[in-house]
Amino acid sequence: MASIETDPSAKLRGLIIGTAVGDSLGLPFEGRGPRFASRPGESGNSMAITAESSIPTSVWQQNLVLGNGLISDDTEHAILVLEALASAPSDVDEFQRNLAMRMRWWFLAMPPGIGMATLKACLRLWLSFSPKRSGVVSGGNGPSMRAALIGALRWEGSAVRRNALVRASSIITHTDPRALIGAEAVAEVAAWEMRRGIAAADEEGVTLPSVTELQTLLLGLPSASEVKDWGMIVEHMRTAMEQRETVATFCARLAADTSIEVRMNLAKGVSGFTLHTVPVAIYTWLRYYGEFPEALAAVLELGGDTDTVAAITGALAGCTCGDIHIPEEWQKKIITRPFSLDRACEIAEAVLAGDPVTGPTFAAAKRQAAILALGETPEAIAAASAAVVAPTKDELAEASRAPSPVLRYPVHLLRNAVTFPLLLLHLLLVLLRVR
């Protein structure tokens, strides 16, 4: 059942946990087409999984390490952005330098599945290139997978403020306008969803977004005029949503448009090209609005770059419904060490509460969400007001203190050393199963 969360803390937790859930479910199938991403039926034959015909949580499960899932660079980069923003909440240049420093140590832990553009950029960072000059020309989806938290944490105020952070994060690794617009789109949709969810929800807890408003938002992105195909892709998104097309049908629509420069190859799934990954993730979030399991099932069955597409979809869907509506069986089966989702949620809330622009609205929204949960009686209003207490500067400083990437490095290296053979083993098992 669809649901919209109005508590900003719950929305943030939903975004962070949703990223990790999507990442962990999609990681074992990364790089494989729909034939390999489908799950075996009782007869042993491959079967298509759709949100309409299956129970997603019983079909899609984490299974890399004794029934548990692992996160990849998608979740890790999102957390690195969060930690950098906590360390430098008001200075864009300092935020960029801090993020670059964290990415250097992240890269030194030899993460499996790293994209070529990110690999080259991290090498340039270790060669003392400035983070303003370390990025390479690539349309990959690296910037997009770490952009949602920027939008959610800086949802208030001028879009210029968000875009400066998004650009600072993006150009560390990617300088192609097509990569930039993907990150801008994910960040702005996350900010839009934070504003919508906090501002209002109807009696059933569901208010569907306006497709026209979303179209205006996406066409107004800073890099929109630099990306030739962006307007056509957004128009396809609007038409598909008006006709309530499935995600697979939307992908086929993009693949069939000969005017699009780089068209999608449905036989190989959704690629890691930003203009494939981001539109599919945003459309899926919109098509299954407030329905987290159904949204993830819809993108996982497509194959391709499943971990990133599912991570971005999970971030947006989780922001909509909050962590309480993400299936617990998915939440509790993720190995994240040396990263901690609980710690990330604490840092994110401290960043929001401590920001001079967002802080006051954040406290007011938490109070209103508590009143909605408890009821609008005088006693409930008093209890809600008492429960929402503004933290002191010392409490905020302690809560937002970001973990050291140097101290985290040994455990991270060990975890990655274990992950690589597990992924190879899983690939072998999938190949044998499909045959």
Image: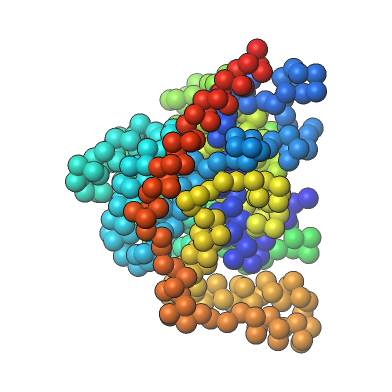
Quarter of the picture containing the C terminus is top right
Residue 306 horizontal side relative to residue 39, left or right: left
One can see residue 50 in this view? yes
Q: Residue 419 in the image: x percent, y percent?
A: 49, 35
Answer with the quarter of the image where residue 51 lies. top right
Q: Is residue 230 above or below residue 80?
A: above
Q: Residue at x 35, y 31 (%)?
A: 116
Q: Is residue 3 above or below residue 273?
A: below
Q: Residue 414 in the image: x percent, y percent?
A: 43, 41
Q: Residue at x 53, y 31 (%)?
A: 422
Q: Residue furthest left?
A: 128
Q: Residue 164 in the image: x percent, y percent?
A: 35, 56
One can see residue 281 in this view? no
Residue 253 horizontal side relative to residue 108, left or right: right
Q: Residue 363 in the image: x percent, y percent?
A: 56, 76
Q: Is residue 416 above or below residue 48?
A: below
Q: How is the image coloured?
A: rainbow
Nearest the viewer among 44 and 14 is 44
Q: Residue furthest top?
A: 435
Answer with the quarter of the image where residue 54 lies. top right
Residue 147 horizontal side relative to residue 24, left or right: left
Q: Residue at x 47, y 82 (%)?
A: 392
Nearest the viewer among 255 and 327 is 327
Nearest the viewer among 427 and 66 is 66
Q: Residue at x 61, y 56 (%)?
A: 14
Q: Is residue 262 above or below residue 209?
A: above
Nearest the viewer among 262 and 274 is 274
Q: How many marks?
A: 0
